[in-house]
Image: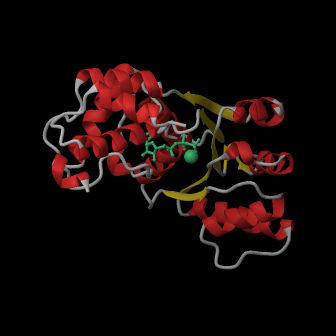
Amino acid sequence: MYLEYWGFSEFPFENVPDPRFFYLSKSHEEALTRLLYAAKMRKGGAMLSGEVGCGKTTLTKVCIQELPREKFDIGLVVNPRLEPVEFLQEVLYQFQSAEVPETKVKCLRMLREKMIENLKARKETVLMIDEAQLLTETTLEEIRLLLNFQMNDRFLITIILLGQPELQERIRAIPQLGQRIAIKYHLDPFDYADTSKYIAFRQKKAGRQGNAFSEESVEKIYENTQGVPRKINNLCDLSLLIGFSRNDKVIGPEIIESVVSDGALL
Ligand SMILES: Nc1ncnc2c1ncn2[C@@H]1O[C@H](COP(=O)(O)OP(=O)(O)OP(=O)(O)O)[C@@H](O)[C@H]1O
Ligand SMILES: [Mg+2]
């Protein structure tokens, strides 16, 4: 394929949330700082909203990597469209509980024991919920109740919700929950400068010296993707393929245009 042709040792624009390829844009840096702050300072709840494909799932992986295992016990739920009991069971499972009880009361008891155990071991309990816009009304209520687990005015758990923009409205509609979420941040796509740096950064990470994309092509990429990383990846990947098949030495704006008109971003 095009790897060797362009001088890459691995594919530069894969759509996987791989922290090795994580680029710290202004907005991603701000988001990461706040999420880490929420976990380290026991802020109770935090929420990160952001448009589709902007990097929320990637940020969960980076966050997990940044929080040392010996101080943080982290559970990540990625598919939260569950009714309360199933949800609590999934949470326990993600916290590596060997046995998951059948009833809600027993699940809650076990979860509380887990938090106390962590407290004694001087570990923070952090629950991250990706795709949180999919949470049901009753499960959101359960999350509110989890935030009631406190001791001496200290939260026993930090809950980080990540989801598409409608998550904001979901949370706003439940003020009892919204007020417990001390940290809220909206992740923006890259601006033009970050789009340009991101494209260069990814190529370098994948082993190439120098930029295969001309400045005009980067402008076209920004115009057509509005800086959304997943769209940039799709567009860049296909452009490299077309450039390779045409034996081009650099990706020019005409390649970007042809990939876009072929419907790559639909
Ligand atoms: N800051 C970043 N650095 C490097 N790559 C990124 C960054 N943000 C996003 N990406 C890339 O974009 C792709 C899409 O990002 P991600 O899956 O994290 O978005 P999302 O916000 O979770 O989207 P969705 O709303 O569809 O769940 C990722 O697979 C990753 O390759
Ligand atoms: Mg995601």
In front: 76, or 58? 58
Against 46, residue 138 (above or below) is below
Query: Residue 102: x percent and y percent?
Result: 83, 75
Residue furthest out toward the bottom: 99
Against 153, residue 187 (above or below) is above
Q: Quadrant of the N terminus?
A: bottom left
Against 195, residue 121 (above or below) is below
Give the residue drawn at x 35%, y 38%.
236
Give the residue drawn at x 71%, y 54%.
80
Q: Tell me where residue 193 sits by quadrant.
A: top left
Query: Residue 53: x percent and y percent?
Result: 53, 39
Display colour scheme: secondary structure
Q: Quadrant of the C terminus?
A: top right
In front: 106, or 26? 26
In front: 25, or 217? 217
Query: Residue 203: x percent and y percent?
Result: 24, 42
Tell me if 38 is positioned left or right of 199 in this view.
right
Count of labels in the image: 0
Give the residue drawn at x 61%, y 65%.
94
Tell me if 26 is positioned left or right of 92 in this view.
left
Q: Tell me where residue 124 sits by quadrant.
A: bottom right
Give the residue drawn at x 30%, y 34%.
199
Query: Residue 260: x percent and y percent?
Result: 44, 32
